[in-house]
Amino acid sequence: MTDPRPLTRTHLLATGFSDDHIRAAVRAGDLVALTRGVYLWRADHDRLDDPARHRVRARHVASTMPPGAVISHVSAATLLNLDVWNIDLAQVHVSRTGSHGRRTRHLHVHATTWTDDDVVDVDGLAVTSPARTVVDLSRALPLDQAVVVGDSALRNYPDTLDLLPAALASARHRSGIARAAAVVPFLDARSESPGESLSRVRIAESGLPRPVLQHPIVLRDGRRVRLDFFWERHGVAGEFDGAGKYADRRDVFAEKLREDALRDLGLEVVRWTWADLTRFDVVAQRFERAVARQSTR
């Protein structure tokens, strides 16, 4: 679905609104202010999620930028349709050459440099490339958010994997580069959702063996399925349940049948949800018990 165009005060005045009309429409809830002098109709605003609303704001900022500036950091990530799980979207981020950056409530200007390879065109806007965006964010974000956005970049833009070493090298003198250098080798395009990316982080933090991702397996009835996580040596399958208690009853039943089919192959199945990602020691204990059961067979 195409993002709606933001309505500026100038545009509204040109179409017959007065400032009093604009204020009244905001009070009535018909218009929603995205930032000073920039609005969306309520219907357009309410159908967008937070990253999409940020994209609209970023597009507006891009239309006001001087030459030589590019949309960057999390704002670039939203325009590239990367996963921006749990990242602060209050400020639109812009990078430009120069000696000074600045911050306001709704804008963060980064003073930096870039090469032609660091910038791509997204619907006519100058945006940092997926590789540059991943490195910029990995230098600044906690591990969880950095891995989520990085995995999605590798998944959506496969050539990013080959471009990341050069992007890291270009940033070698910037703050946070050690953090980014640790994040990049951990990224994996096979993580299919933020929950799976976070699961990989938790598995590593818990000291569990590294699993194979999206492992194909054939059930006894001939169906081919993929396992989110597979520890072949231990005979354990790991499944991340992103829906949790909100899953449709039919989906829950289908998952139960799938688990039964996996167990019929002699596998142990360990399942976890979003809530478990905040207490992964519980999942690690389930894994250890599953391994113990396999060792007695």
Image (spheres, helix red, strand yellow):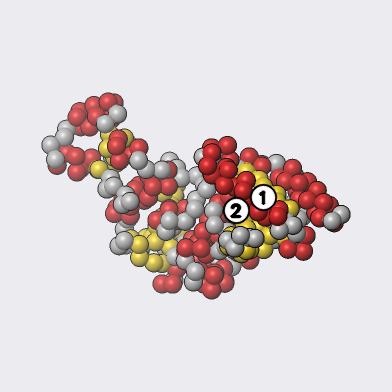
Q: How far from the left and from the top, in percent, is residue 54?
A: 39, 46
Identify whether 63 is placed above or below 251: below
Instruction: Tell me the quadrant of the picture where the C terminus can be found.
Output: bottom right
Q: Residue furthest right?
A: 296
Q: Taking 56 as reference, is 112 left or right?
A: right
- Where on the picture, by quarter, is residue 219? bottom right
Residue type at mark 2 is: Glu
- Is 172 in front, or is 249? 249
Q: How far from the left and from the top, in percent, is residue 85?
A: 52, 48
Of mark 2 and mark 1, the one earlier in the sequence is 2
Q: How far from the left and from the top, in percent, is residue 190?
A: 57, 62
The residue where tag 2 is placed is 196
Element at badge 2?
helix
Residue at 66 percent of width and 45 percent of height: 272
Q: Residues within 10 Å of mark 1 (few under 14, many from 20)?
A: some
Q: Residue furthest front?
A: 221
Q: How far from the left and from the top, in percent, is residue 210?
A: 72, 61
- Is 42 in front, or is 225? 225
Residue at 50 percent of width and 66 percent of height: 131
The residue where tag 1 is placed is 260
